[in-house]
Image (cartoon, rainbow, N blue to C red):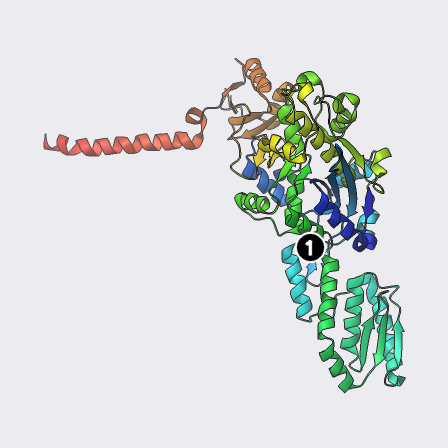
Amino acid sequence: MCEVIRDNFEDYFPVIEKAIRRSDFVGIDTEFTGLTIGEQTKPSLFDTGEERYKKLRKCVTQITINQLGLAAFIKDPKENRYEVQSFNLYLFPTTFGPVDVCFTVQASSWEFQSKYNMDFNKMIYHGISFMNEEQHNLVKDHICSHAMNSGQLRVGDEYAAQKICSHIAAWVNYAKEKDKYVVSTQDIQGIKDIFVLSKEIRNRFPLVWTVTDESGNIFVEKVTMETRQQLEQKSAEAQQQEEQKLLESMLGITRIFRVLRECKKPLVGHNMLFDLLLLYDKFYKPLPVSYRQFKVELNSMLPTIFDTKHITNSLRKTMEETGLLDSTTLEDLYIMFKSPKGREHVIHSPDIFHAEGFDRYKTKHVPHEAGYDSFLSGYVFLRMAHILTFQETKSSEVVPCTFRRYLHSLASYTNSINVIRASLSHICLDGPDPPSKRPELLYVKSRHLNKPLNMTQLAGWFSPYGSVDIRLEDKTCAYVAAGNFRCAKDILTAFKGHDTIYVTKYSIWRHSLVVRSLLWAGTLVSGCICLWAIWPGQKNM
């Protein structure tokens, strides 16, 4: 693993880009500052794919990413093995001009991450910047409009900047033409603040010119007005290059996302729906209101995505006897597939090793570090791909195979993303979502009109039988979504003949208030039409 922060990002970007371009697939993971924003965004067994998207969209737009993990898996052309280059990147949003995002920190999320030694100081002090396209355009327009005379430096730097300008003001009064003054920028952090300071000096002092060296020091030269005008005309191209360099530095992680979009390498994650929404919102553009638009645009950018949570959940019953999928948490899956039992379940499973200089995860287990989890996702994916490819093949006929063959075997799992605690098990990014395989809803009604239903009491009654969600229709009626068929059956059996509530399977014709209202309305209209048709005849008689 390589740890990548703001200070070494420019050095590592070519390494990351090369690894992605060489890879057969890329494992990916994110760590973020919150998971739910209020009760209304909590997952529910009633949720459809579209409803879950709306909930997650509310959360994603209010939080940010603090770690991004990438693991490039590269097939050895001569050997049955994959080399892995893992990267753990710390992130912090860009702040410049009109772009200054607010994000929510959920205490429980950071409490959880702190248990796994998340370095929040590293995120804040050394996090790599990023922008989506909308923010990029705002910053670009701001720079091009030259609206940079004030308010750009961080509050902590304003004193240092004012002090520098005061020294220059004192110097410029006695300086002669071509005299130079060197500004040390030790107290001014980052390329964007140095850029703005240089602009500020030029704006305040019309008889000076500034040049910044590679170390970030600013050289101020005393010039005439004529020379200043000539330098401004000549430096137009250099100015554009400087502005482009500034934009590149603020794009930061977004440049990696653009490489992923360009290469269209298969992406692999574990339970990755939230990750995908974050990638879209933070590196591409704000999440659209339309669920369908999100799926179409994401699939266009990243056409091949695998979710190991969905794959392992789908195979859990068929592989029950193996014991490999007793738990589908990422860490447990990795431990199982790394064991001799997991590696040798089907012979000729490829070797997976850490590339030279990327071997931190060879000896250290750091769950919930994004780089580590991205590696685990890719590792589990390869093991599952090999098993699926040869699950109906005799051992004597199993051979090492290409990654292309793995992709062919996994075709039915492509772009199917796991959804936790919802009415459907997964969504499809490249087409309509699958029908629900959850049990039918249960309908609950109070047997006594003067005794309204109580949500807390219902939850206490039903939860011992399994995972349930309850939704009140009115004071005397409620719907219950059960997590599995056994749970639904046990509730029906246990509450048959209950003295307080009546529980049955939900029927849209008998229990839907809307449908019943429409049926009554239809009956009433039909009756009126019949009476209207009969009335003239009766009148004549």
Quadrant of residue 315 within the rendered picture: top right
In this rendering, position of residue 412 left or right of residue 175:
left
Quadrant for the N terminus, please.
top right
Q: Nearer the viewer, residue 271 or 77?
A: 77
- Mark 1 residue element: loop
Instruction: Tell me residue 103's x, y (percent).
Output: 70, 50
- Indicate left or right for 113 with 458 as reference: right
Mark 1: give few (<14), some (14-19) or many (20+) Cα within 10 Å: many
Q: Foreground residue, 159 or 438?
A: 438
| Vertical arrangement, residue 216 with respect to residue 309, above or below | below
Residue 246, image x and y in percent? 74, 63
Quickly name the residue at label 1: 131
Q: Amino acid at mark 1?
A: Met
Can the viewer see residue 499? yes
Asked if 64 appears above or below 190 in the picture, the reply is: above
Residue at x 65% of width, y 34% of height = 307
* Residue 431 position in % (x across, y down): 52, 38
